């Protein structure tokens, strides 16, 4: 069942952090890193397998503790055994016990905290309370779910001992013990000073330390999605759908019967377990405020594992209730036995295929093949976890390709790749650069590093004249002006254990890996002039990756790049349907519609962008072009004039405005002034220079080429001589604008 090598989600990064005693992603997970590091000494298997074994060990202990907890509540061993195994085979928990992740350890700490409190309530031995404080404090050093559950534990203590202040010294000692354990967070700055292979957030300074522990990098996730009652109800519905499949729909009702059982026997325990279930499900749902797309649901469902643990306890209590003594005992015992067997077998059968990782090589294959793609000393800019963390693991743990620089292994450009940038520029960037700052950094690296640069998604090369991107197998290689595309058959060098889309079992990362493969294959088939074969590959890509806005936009961009404009329009239109505010897709769809001659539809896209940001110069320019094509000449002139207030030295804008006055509005004077200013800004325009052969009129004042236009951008008074009256000038062709990729 355990995977032989690096797997999905954050495993590559976490394995590396455990192996190198590094700082994992916020909040750093110091306890997990230390415990997982111990498993790296197991004398068997790869380092990845050993760390996964740690997750399995934590999971097995959780199941054992859960069994003890239910025995304590109902004194029924077989019902407790069935409940524990039902939880062991539940979908989310089982999946996290097989990969290097923090959630099986978190489940162990939650289960152990509950058991210790229940034992304390029954015996009133303070030793249980002190041990609980140590476990709870250690839980705070692993996952912040424990912080959310803290008030529940305090409330339980108050219910058991209402006059708790009479024993203030005991509770002060508990508080002190919990706080002492949290000193384990000092691991973060200590290990950061050693500059390990993973040093997320570099928590050597106080501010960096606070940012890592408080997960500041992810704070945007709490506000990025709209909130409201309707949204919350939709999220709750999604939670219950996922919950139903944890134990399978035909067994999911049993925990609710368990509520009745614990209410009759142990009301404080009902408060404890009930509030944990509510906070770990509905409370976290409210806090996370997730989207209802596949990726969000997959990523966030593991946060609900403590709620599933309580649900499993409810299964045991329900089985005990159903097998109670009295009239019809034998029949009830048989029914309870059958339900207990079904509670174990149903989730086992439902989740076995997806959780069998014994032949899981998807991320390993992707990482190895990407490393085969990259030239010596390359700088690699990945844009997704599954394209980042396997490469990090292979390099830092297995020692493969140490010459490669992973430029953004923390989700943003690492300062090490642009440390030579002038300090006056570098010091203006935020610690976690904005998208605009990331683009500046990438452009600087491309121009000044002197090293091969690769990206996993296509990016615009606007602002880098002469630079271009070339398909390079699973990646894109930046070509400098003097470079030609490498003649290399990347696909012949790649090796895969399987490329069968049906073999993934629906596991998200495996689907994403194969989706990337089929997209890259389709893109290369388009370059080879095989559109029908390419579209078949794109269909597989879309089926695996799902209709995400990023995937659809990339498919549309690839189709447009190779002339399949009708298909590009379909993909991009669907993208906008999913996210009407997705700026990249709006821009791309507008450009495709221009190519198709659908200027009315194109104008709608650019107007949406201008409404969002009226200083978006490209959208203003393209909207003006659409207005010209639609015959809205006055509106187009106004739009071009506004563009010149944004970019007053824009030779192309002066040129287009000049052509508009010349060809459509027949205002020769204004046309001459605009075209003259365009030539002043860019003399390399042969079609206009050819019209300069006649002598200038010395009486014509061109000190303000846009005199009479509104607004006046205030241009310098050194314009070229006046051009004579011109006949109709045909508009020269302009190279097509490149489309922008998604994430």
Image: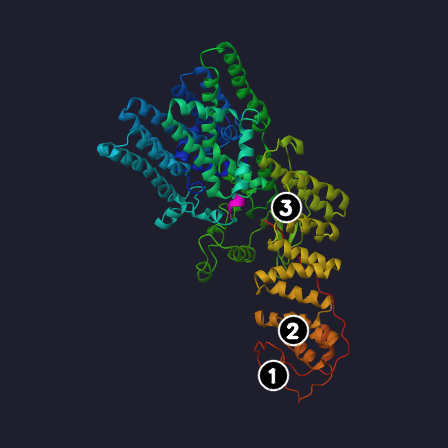
| Residue 703 marker | 1
Q: Is residue 85 visible?
A: yes
Membership of 228 in magenta stretch: yes
Q: Is residue 399 visible?
A: no
Expressed as whole percent of the image width and height from the top left, the position of residue 620 reads: 62, 65
Between discs 2 and 1, the one toward the N terminus: 2
Q: Which residue is mark 2?
A: 654
| SS assignment at label 3 | helix
Magenta region: which residues? 227-231
* Label 1 packing within 10 angstroms: few (<14), some (14-19), many (20+): some
Measured in 3D between alpha carbons, the distance from the residue under mark 2 to the one under mark 1, in whole angstroms, is: 15 Å
* Label 3 packing within 10 angstroms: few (<14), some (14-19), many (20+): many
Examine the image and state in which quarter residue 662 appears. Answer: bottom right
348 versus 438 height, above or below:
above
Residue placed most toward the observer, 501 or 378: 501
Quarter containing the N terminus? top right
Expressed as whole percent of the image width and height from the top left, the position of residue 246 reads: 54, 29
């Amino acid at each position: 069942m355990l995977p032989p090598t690096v797997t999905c989600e954050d495993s590559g990064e976490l394995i590396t952090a455990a192996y190198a005693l590094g700082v994992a992603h916020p909040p750093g997970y110091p306890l997990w890193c230390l415990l997982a590091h111990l498993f790296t000494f197991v004398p068997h298997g790869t380092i990845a397998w050993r760390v996964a074994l740690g997750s399995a060990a934590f999971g097995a202990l959780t199941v054992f503790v859960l069994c003890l907890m239910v025995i304590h509540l109902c004194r029924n061993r077989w019902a407790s055994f069935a409940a524990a195994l039902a939880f062991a085979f539940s979908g989310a928990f089982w999946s996290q016990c097989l990969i290097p992740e923090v959630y099986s350890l978190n489940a162990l700490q939650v289960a152990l905290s509950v058991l210790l409190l229940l034992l304390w309530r029954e015996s009133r031995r303070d030793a249980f309370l002190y041990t609980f404080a140590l476990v709870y404090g250690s839980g705070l050093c692993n996952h912040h779910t424990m912080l959310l559950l803290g008030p529940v534990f305090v409330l339980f203590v108050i219910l058991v001992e209402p006059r708790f202040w009479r024993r203030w010294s005991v509770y002060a000692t508990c508080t002190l013990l919990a706080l002492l354990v949290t000193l384990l967070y000092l691991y973060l700055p200590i290990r950061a000073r050693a500059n390990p292979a993973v040093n997320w957030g570099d928590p050597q300074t106080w501010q960096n330390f606070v940012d890592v522990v408080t997960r500041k990098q992810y704070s945007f996730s709490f506000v990025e999605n709209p909130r409201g009652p309707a949204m919350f109800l939709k999220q709750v519905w999604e939670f219950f759908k996922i919950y139903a499949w944890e134990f399978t729909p035909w067994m999911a009702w049993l925990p609710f019967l368990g509520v009745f059982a614990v209410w009759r026997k142990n009301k404080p325990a009902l408060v404890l377990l009930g509030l944990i279930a509510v906070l770990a499900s509905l409370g976290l749902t409210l806090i996370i405020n997730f989207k209802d797309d596949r990726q969000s649901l997959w990523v966030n469902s593991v946060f609900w594992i403590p709620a599933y643990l309580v649900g499993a306890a409810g299964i045991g209590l329900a089985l005990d209730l159903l097998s109670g003594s009295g009239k019809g005992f034998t029949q009830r015992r048989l029914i309870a036995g059958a339900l207990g067997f079904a509670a174990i077998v149903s989730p086992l059968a439902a989740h076995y295929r997806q959780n069998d990782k014994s032949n899981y090589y998807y991320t390993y294959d992707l990482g190895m093949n990407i490393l085969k793609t990259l030239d010596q000393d390359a700088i690699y800019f990945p844009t997704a976890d599954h394209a980042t963390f396997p490469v990090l693991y292979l390099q830092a743990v297995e020692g493969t390709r140490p010459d490669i620089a992973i430029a953004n292994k923390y989700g943003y450009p690492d300062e090490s790749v642009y440390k030579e940038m002038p300090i006056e520029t570098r010091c203006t960037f935020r610690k976690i650069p904005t998208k605009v700052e990331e683009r500046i950094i990438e452009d600087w690296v491309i121009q000044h590093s002197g090293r091969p640069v690769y990206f996993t998604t296509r990016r615009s090369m606007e602002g880098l004249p002469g630079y271009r991107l070339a398909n390079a197998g699973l990646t894109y290689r930046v070509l400098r002006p003097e470079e030609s595309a490498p003649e290399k058959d990347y696909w012949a060098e790649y090796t895969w254990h399987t490329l069968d889309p049906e073999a993934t079992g629906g596991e998200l990362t495996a689907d994403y890996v194969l989706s990337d493969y089929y997209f890259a294959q389709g893109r290369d088939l388009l370059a080879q002039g095989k559109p029908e074969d390419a579209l078949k590959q794109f269909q597989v890509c879309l089926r695996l990756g799902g209709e995400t806005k990023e995937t659809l936009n990339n498919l549309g961009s690839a189709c447009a790049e190779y002339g399949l404009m009708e298909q590009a329009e379909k993909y991009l239109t669907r993208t906008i349907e999913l996210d009407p505010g997705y700026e990249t897709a709006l821009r791309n769809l507008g450009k495709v519609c221009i190519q198709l001659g659908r200027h009315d539809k194109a104008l709608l896209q650019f107007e949406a962008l201008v409404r969002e940001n009226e200083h978006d110069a490209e959208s203003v320019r393209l909207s003006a072009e659409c207005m010209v094509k639609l015959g809205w000449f006055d509106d187009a002139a106004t739009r071009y004039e506004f563009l010149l207030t944004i970019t007053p030295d824009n030779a192309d804008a002066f040129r287009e405005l000049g052509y508009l006055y010349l060809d459509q509005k027949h205002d020769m004077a204004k046309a001459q002034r605009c075209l003259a200013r365009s030539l002043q800004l860019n003399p390399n325009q042969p079609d206009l220079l050819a019209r300069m052969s006649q002598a200038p009129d010395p009486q014509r004042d061109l000190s303000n080429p846009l005199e009479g236009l509104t607004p006046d951008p205030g241009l310098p008074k050194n314009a070229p001589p006046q051009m004579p009256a011109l006949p109709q000038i045909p508009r020269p062709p302009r190279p097509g604008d490149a489309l922008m990729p998604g994430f």
